Amino acid sequence: MYMDALNGTGQEEKRADIEKIRIDSSLPLEQRMKQYLERIKDPYCFLCGKTPVRICFSPEGEDLDTKLKHYIQRRGAAAYRRFYGEEQKER
């Protein structure tokens, strides 16, 4: 049932493909985040190539911002700086 909600609904072409999204890294953090949200359209339901992705969180868990920060930090300092910009390097 869960996969049925993601596949075969005719909505796949409406979802943004995260692999094709490019963000201008010269912009300030707030503008980069806005640009990302405008391009992804729905940060909880998108494509990664041909794979549909749906993100859900429990009410007791961390919010999306915290999850993204942890994910980027695990990917390494370079990925963190690309997303958050050089100004975050000193934190």
Image: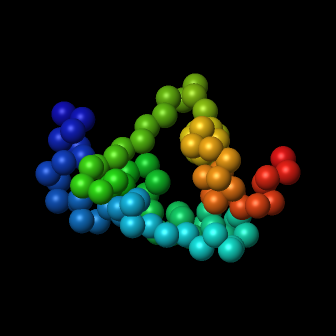
How far from the left and from the top, in percent, is residue 90?
A: 85, 51
> Camera-side residue: 49 or 53?
49
Position in image of residue 27 (x %, y %) = 69, 73
**Which residue is at a point 64% across and 69% down the rendered structure image?**
25
Residue 60, by quadrant, is top right
Q: Is residue 69 left or right of residue 23?
A: right
- Quadrant where the N terminus sits is top left
Q: Is 50 on the left or on the right of 54, as rendered?
A: left
- The x and y percentages for residue 29 are 71, 64
87 over 71 or under it: above or below: below
Query: Where residue 21 appears, x then y in whole percent?
Result: 44, 67
Residue 63 seen in this snapshot? no
Q: Give whichever of 23, 86 is nearer the camera.
A: 86
Q: Residue furthest top?
A: 60
Going 45% across and 63% down the picture, which residue do you hit?
Answer: 40
For the rendered model, the colour scheme is: rainbow
Q: Name the residue: 39% across, 67% down.
A: 20
Q: Is residue 2 above or below residue 45?
A: above
Q: Is residue 62 visible?
A: yes
Q: Is residue 88 left or right of residue 5?
A: right
**Residue at image point 65% right, 53% down:** 78
The one nearer the camera, 6 or 19, is 19
Camera-side residue of 64 and 59: 64
